[in-house]
Image: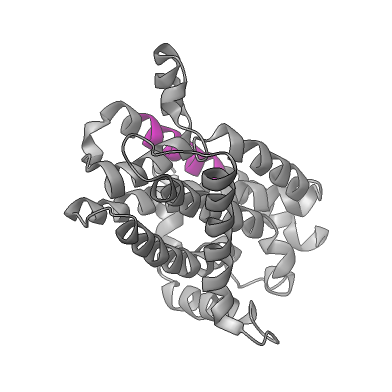
Amino acid sequence: MNLLKLPFHFLLDIYRQKFLVFQLTSREFKNKYVGSYLGFLWTIIQPFVMIFVLWLVFTKGFKSGDVEGIPFIAWLTCGLVVWDFFATTLSAGTNVFSDYQFLVKKIQFNVAILPLIKIFSSLITHGIMLLIAMGILIFSGVEFSWYWFQIFYYLFALLAFLLGVSWITSSFQVFLKDTAQVVNVFLQFGFWLTPIMWNYQMLPEKYQSLLNFHPLFYIVNGYRESFLFKVPFWENLQGMLVFWGTTGAILLISVIVFKKLRPHFADVL
């Protein structure tokens, strides 16, 4: 099979099991809050508290002012909702084959769908965070714009990137148990290397273009351009081409890695 067609056929096989994905996602999300008194409310409380604490520290403690004429809380929130979704999903997705090893050992079960379960489960929380973020933006004085609907494009881009990375890390995690710890360390560094708490325009102009090679920068900046600055997503053509080129390569590599290691999962687990 042509390597360029491999990811397409792989994703098509997964699409045929969309109803199973929906059922497992629903159960995964419900299981997060089993035995919890507040249950589903934690989905709202946790992101709200995180945003509030960081806003308090930076605006009251460090006296951070507006960023490019945008209230700091609005600017910060747009970056945090992206990072929280990415970090939470990647961390959970890396351990997915261990969490569902009873399914991995079933010969007839397509375990390629399991990382999707973690992604879609986290997507529900992300949707709630987006609603909270929109409320914060409006409260901060940011007016609603039709550009807000560009979020669906950037969200799709983030899902594609996450799926490829999750297939790779989850496959390695089966054989190398330190993979999850490496991912967590990467996420700690990645948080500060991504312009979430700082403005990329602080960098010398000659280095700013290098950020186009940072996939998470493309998404974070896209959220801000959609919510705050009303910039059409096709304007950054270079960033778009680099991002999708990188994501396409990661998806291709992830499918090859998964197909190579999948036959040995049950033996190791």
In the picture, residue 256 is in which quadrant? top right
Q: Is residue 17 magenta?
A: no
Q: Nearer the viewer, residue 91 or 110?
A: 91
Q: Nearer the viewer, residue 5 or 22?
A: 22
Query: Residue 133 in the image: x percent, y percent?
Result: 40, 60
Position of 205 compared to 257: left or right?
A: left
Residue 190 visible within the image: yes
Question: Above or below — where is 158 with respect to 201?
Answer: below
Q: Main secondary structure of the magenta part?
A: helix
Position of 134 compared to 260: left or right?
A: left
Query: Residue 25 in the image: x percent, y percent?
Result: 52, 75
Task: Please count the marks in the image.
Answer: 0
Point 58% across, 75% down: residue: 42
Q: Which residues are magenta?
A: 242-255
Point 43% across, 38% down: residue: 65
Query: Residue 69 in the image: x percent, y percent?
Result: 31, 37
Residue placed farthest to the left in the image? 146
The quadrant of the picture occupied by the C terminus is: bottom right
Point 50% across, 40% down: residue: 196
In the picture, residue 30 is in which quadrant? bottom right
Query: Residue 130 in the image: x percent, y percent?
Result: 40, 62
The quadrant of the picture occupied by the N terminus is: top left
Q: Is residue 245 magenta?
A: yes
